[in-house]
Image: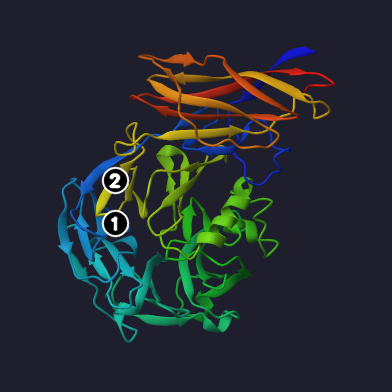
């Protein structure tokens, strides 16, 4: 009989939802909730707090950021209204809309800087906001301007999607309204459907430069790539690619620009557009950004892809991409990736109908007309933030003999008071949330972690910790340790 100490390192490798439980790297975690993996440590996330209570009964389902010259404003859509929430005090700008889910873009012309916005209700004319007031656009094109459901700027022109069709309508260069011209992608879409999203994509053209491409994603999972400044001139507008992807999630936010690339939220998981080139089909389970959570990502799209609230947002200051994943019409989780390391985690406790950046800080829209500021404070609007980490299962005995697990401890670096519970899961079991029965106090940076008695007999083990702050402070999980005895006949 021999006694040993097993060290389970900081889960900087992040949440792993694709590898077999007996094949994960030591720095991965089976569960990593509300704990963000950085390059050197794993930190209990910050919370959120009320930024503006608009007083509306409906949820905030769009946040618009306006930036013109030295002016930056934050607008919210709730209960059919457009509301200025820049100061934290609500000021209604316009009312009477039939949808609160808007597609929008900022656009600057010689006349000023604007936000242009459309929704998919089929009843609301797109609006333009000039930094002070909201007005309907004035244009001539489709039978009803209310059928313009999405908007994007490409090569100085404003492009609008016509709802439930495969057509876009575009303006003259430098304009966002006026005469609109139609371009129908229908003849190129063999699967039919309608346009799910439009966006732009910048890629290396192979000649030491870059091409800015027009991207169309259909509801049937076809992607079309076009290049050129003017769809009205055949020699200045040409298809440069076409391929199939998984069915995109519901709503206008199935794509997001991640620098020069595009992240698609679809049946293949969370897939960078660049990964489709070369093969013409998905490689989501082998090469994409979300490979490590491939099963969780594809399962989420399969189970909840038809629900409203899907959105991906790049959060540069937090070195993260936040993907809003609806679980029901009122419950939302977030899948979060560290853009520096590619490591993932999952956030719970933030029921966000939409996300937006304002002055580089993240905000989200909540129920009952409330706009919250995220990544701030130590609680979720007064509620505790409980982080959970189940480390990857490791087998110190190389699975040739059983081990008796005797004691375990975490090493936690904290600048505030905490409470936690540590269990030891053996042979791929998963324990449920207990009472957080161990407390520790700190007024300055302190490393805590007493040895705790545990029991378990098996070939492999994974420490499982739940932790929360009970006062303001930074909480970092440094590593987890366990003692065990091995024998040819542990009973």
Q: Is residue 302 left or right of residue 161?
A: right
The residue at 19%/71% (across/down) is: 96
Residue 186 in the image, given as x and y percentages of width and height: 52, 82
On residue 284, which mark appears?
Answer: none
Whether residue 19 is visible to the viewer of this picture, yes or no, is yes
Considering the image in quadrants, where does the N terminus appear?
A: top right
Is residue 442 or residue 114 the one in the foreground? Answer: 442
Residue wearing tag 2: 372
Q: Is residue 79 left or right of residue 306?
A: left
Considering the image in quadrants, where does the C terminus appear?
A: top right
Quick check: 122 above or below 36?
below
Mark 1, other Cα within 10 Å: few <14 / some 14–19 / many ≥20: many
Residue 206 in the image, given as x and y percentages of width and height: 63, 57
The residue most toward the bottom is 143
Is residue 97 or residue 386 the one in the foreground? Answer: 386
Whether residue 171 is visible to the viewer of this picture, yes or no, is no
Dividing the picture into quadrants, the one containing residue 488 is top right
Residue 447 in the image, given as x and y percentages of width and height: 48, 15
Give the number of callouts. 2
Label 1 sits on a secondary structure element that is loop
Residue wearing tag 1: 60
Is residue 326 or residue 152 the one in the foreground? Answer: 326
């Amino acid at each position: 009989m021999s006694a040993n100490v097993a060290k389970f390192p900081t889960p900087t490798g992040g949440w792993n939802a694709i590898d077999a439980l007996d094949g994960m790297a030591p720095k991965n975690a089976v569960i990593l909730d509300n704990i963000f993996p950085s390059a050197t440590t794993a930190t209990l996330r910050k919370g959120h707090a009320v930024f503006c209570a608009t007083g509306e009964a409906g949820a905030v389902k769009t946040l618009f950021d306006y930036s013109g010259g030295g002016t930056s404003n934050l607008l919210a859509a709730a209960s059919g209204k457009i509301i200025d929430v820049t100061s934290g005090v609500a000021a209604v700008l316009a009312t009477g809309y039939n949808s609160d889910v808007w597609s929008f873009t900022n656009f600057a012309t010689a006349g000023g800087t604007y936000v242009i916005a459309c929704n998919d209700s089929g009843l609301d004319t797109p609006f333009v906001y000039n930094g002070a007031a909201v007005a309907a656009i004035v244009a001539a094109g489709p039978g009803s301007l209310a059928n313009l459901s999405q908007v994007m700027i490409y090569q100085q022109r404003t492009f609008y999607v016509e709802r439930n069709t495969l057509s876009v309508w575009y303006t003259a260069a430098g304009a966002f309204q006026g005469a609109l011209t139609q371009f129908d992608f229908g003849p190129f879409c063999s699967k039919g459907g309608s346009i799910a999203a439009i966006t732009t994509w910048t890629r290396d053209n192979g000649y030491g430069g870059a091409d800015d491409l027009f991207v169309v994603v259909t509801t049937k999972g076809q992607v079309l790539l076009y290049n050129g400044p003017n769809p009205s001139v055949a020699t200045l507008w040409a298809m440069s690619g076409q391929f199939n992807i998984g069915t995109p999630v519901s709503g206008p936010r199935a794509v997001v620009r991640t620098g020069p690339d595009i992240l698609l939220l679809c049946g293949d998981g969370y897939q960078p557009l660049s990964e489709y080139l070369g093969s013409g089909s998905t490689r989501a389970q082998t090469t994409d950004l979300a490979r490590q959570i491939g099963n969780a990502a594809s399962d989420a799209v399969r189970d909840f892809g038809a629900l409203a609230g899907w959105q991906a947002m790049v959060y540069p200051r937090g070195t993260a991409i936040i993907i809003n994943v609806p679980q029901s019409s009122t419950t939302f989780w977030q899948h979060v990736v560290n853009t520096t390391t590619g490591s993932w985690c999952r956030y719970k406790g933030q029921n966000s109908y939409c996300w937006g950046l304002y002055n580089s800080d993240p905000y989200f829209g909540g129920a009952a007309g409330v706009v919250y500021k995220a990544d701030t404070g130590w609680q979720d609007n007064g509620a505790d933030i409980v982080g959970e980490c189940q480390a990857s299962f490791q087998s110190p005995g190389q699975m040739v003999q059983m081990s008796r697990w005797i004691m375990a401890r975490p090493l936690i670096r904290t600048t505030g008071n905490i409470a936690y519970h540590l269990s030891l899961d053996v042979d791929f079991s998963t324990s449920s949330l207990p009472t957080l029965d161990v407390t520790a106090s700190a007024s300055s940076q302190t490393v805590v972690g007493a040895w705790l008695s545990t029991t378990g007999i098996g070939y492999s083990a994974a420490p499982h910790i739940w932790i929360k702050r009970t006062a303001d402070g930074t909480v970092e999980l440094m590593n987890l340790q366990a003692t065990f005895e091995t024998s040819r006949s542990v009973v």
